[in-house]
């Protein structure tokens, strides 16, 4: 597994409309990738988030790893999304993992694109119904009328939990979307 970057070219330029620009081998455990500016962020499970500098033709360079809660065994980064200067990362907390159970990390890329500060989290016990987002399989963030909303696929309840994350330091629970009856074990794939 690895980071594979492609570009779409006009159909007249070649037989296919995509071409590989570069490939970075990360080994096993790459689940999602997002880009912001000169950097790509790769979700790597228990290894955290790998930061790859992608500026410059054909010369990607690993420049760091973001490891929230370094040294604790409750990290399994499964999904990442960059929106402006904010990086969101979901954490599918392993069963029996130590506390805190944080389902979503929010990083401020303006502080440093390689080693960003945590500007917010959605953590079990931090507010009403936060436990439903204490373990997140995947998610998406959307900006509507100037407000940022995170839609989190809860690995605990198999529901989609909605938070207003406009102020990352104070995420606010907004809604709970339940799957139709008779669909046990539903892990919605959102953002695809």
Image (cartoon, rainbow, N blue to C red):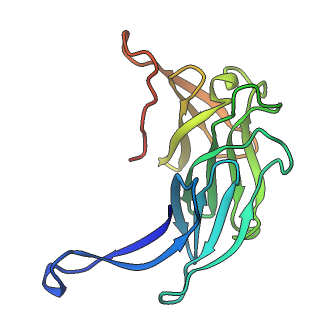
Q: Is residue 81 left or right of residue 5?
A: right
- Return the x and y of residue 128 as percentages of the image width and height: 71, 20
Q: Nearer the viewer, residue 112 or 74?
A: 74
Question: Residue 101: where, in percent of width, then height?
Answer: 75, 32
In the displayed image of the protein, which residue is found farthest to the front? 27
**Is 127 positioned to the left or the right of 79 in the image?**
right
Percent x, y of residue 102: 73, 36
Extreme residue in the bottom direction: 57
Q: Residue at x 78, y 28 (%)?
A: 126
The quarter of the displayed image where residue 75 is located = top right
Looking at the image, which is closer to me, 56 or 98?
98
Residue 29, percent from left and from top: 58, 53
Where 167 sits versus 35, above or below?
Answer: above
Residue 62 found in image quarter: bottom right
On screen, residue 101 above or below 19: above
Residue at the extreme top: 181
Count of picture labels: 0
Q: Relative to 4, is 147 on the left or the right?
A: right
Residue beneath the point at 70% across and 48% down: 46
Residue 100, relative to residue 185: is it above or below? below
The residue under the point 76% across, 52% down is: 119
Q: In the drawing, does residue 14 fall left or right of residue 141?
A: left
Residue 154, by quadrant, is: top right
Q: Residue at x 55, y 36 (%)?
A: 137
């Amino acid at each position: 597994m690895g980071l594979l970057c492609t570009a779409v070219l006009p159909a007249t330029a070649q037989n296919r409309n995509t071409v590989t620009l570069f490939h970075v081998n990360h080994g096993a455990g790459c689940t999602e990738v997002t880009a912001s500016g000169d950097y790509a962020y790769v979700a790597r499970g228990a290894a955290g988030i790998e930061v790859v500098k992608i500026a410059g033709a054909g010369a990607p360079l690993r420049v760091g790893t973001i490891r929230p809660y370094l040294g604790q065994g409750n990290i399994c980064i499964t999904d990442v999304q960059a929106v402006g200067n904010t990086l969101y990362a979901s954490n599918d907390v392993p069963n029996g993992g130590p506390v805190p159970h944080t389902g979503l990390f929010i990083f401020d890329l303006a502080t440093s694109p390689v080693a960003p500060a945590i500007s917010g989290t959605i953590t079990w016990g931090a507010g009403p119904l936060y436990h439903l987002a204490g373990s997140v399989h995947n998610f998406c963030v959307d900006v509507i009328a100037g407000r940022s909303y995170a839609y989190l696929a809860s690995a605990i309840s198999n529901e989609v939990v909605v938070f207003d994350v406009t102020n990352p330091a104070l995420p606010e629970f907004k809604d709970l979307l339940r799957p139709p009856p008779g669909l046990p074990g539903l892990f919605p794939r959102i953002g695809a």
